[in-house]
């Protein structure tokens, strides 16, 4: 195996390790966020829920775009 192939394999393995860890962290945070849907513990309006999920969807679209192009704009932040 050439040195280039070893480097490519090592980068792929690093990507897979990091992505598995990060995706699982995100999934856990989503589960935690969904706990806010318990109306016996929290009060919220539908417009608040829509604003939260709109922000998440925007961030997710930006992240997906980075896998499709060289765009490096990651400055989006959620704010009430």
Image (cartoon, rainbow, N blue to C red):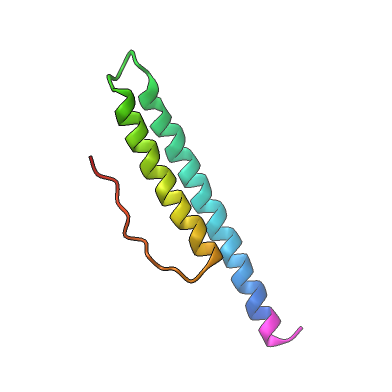
Q: Is residue 8 left or right of residue 46?
A: right
Counting from the top left corner in percent of width and height, residue 21 is at 52, 52
Pinpoint residue 31: horizontal percent, then vertical percent: 46, 33
Camera-side residue of 21 and 65: 65
Residue 2 located within the stretch drawn in magenta: yes
Which residue is most to the right? 1
> Looking at the rendering, which quadrant does residue 16 occupy?
bottom right
Tell me the quadrant of the picture where the C terminus can be found.
top left
The number of numbered badges drawn on the structure is: 0
Could you tell me which quadrant the N terminus lies in? bottom right
Q: Residue at x 54, y 63 (%)?
A: 67
Instruction: Check the image and name the residue furthest to the top.
Output: 40
| Residue 41 in the image, given as x and y percentages of width and height | 31, 17
Residue 42 falls left or right of residue 25: left
Q: Main secondary structure of the magenta part?
A: helix
Position of 15 compared to 56: left or right?
Answer: right
Q: Is residue 53 left or right of residue 23?
A: left
- Which of 67/30 is in front? 67
**Residue at figure coordinates x 47%, y 39% from the top left:** 28
Which residue does the image show at 36% across and 26% down from the upper left? 36
Q: Is residue 33 above or below residue 11?
A: above
| Nearer-the-camera pick, 56 or 9 | 56
Q: Say which residue appears at 52% left-offset and 68% top-offset.
A: 69
Residue 13 in the image: x percent, y percent? 63, 66
- Which region shows up in magenta? 1-5
């Amino acid at each position: 195996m050439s040195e280039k192939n070893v480097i490519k394999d090592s980068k792929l393995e690093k990507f897979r390790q990091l992505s598995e860890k990060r995706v699982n962290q995100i999934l856990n945070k989503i589960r935690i966020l969904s706990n806010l849907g318990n109306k016996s513990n929290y009060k919220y309006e539908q417009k608040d829920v829509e604003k939260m999920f709109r922000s998440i969807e925007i961030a997710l679209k930006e992240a997906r775009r980075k896998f499709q192009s060289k765009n490096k704009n990651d400055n989006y932040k959620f704010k009430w």
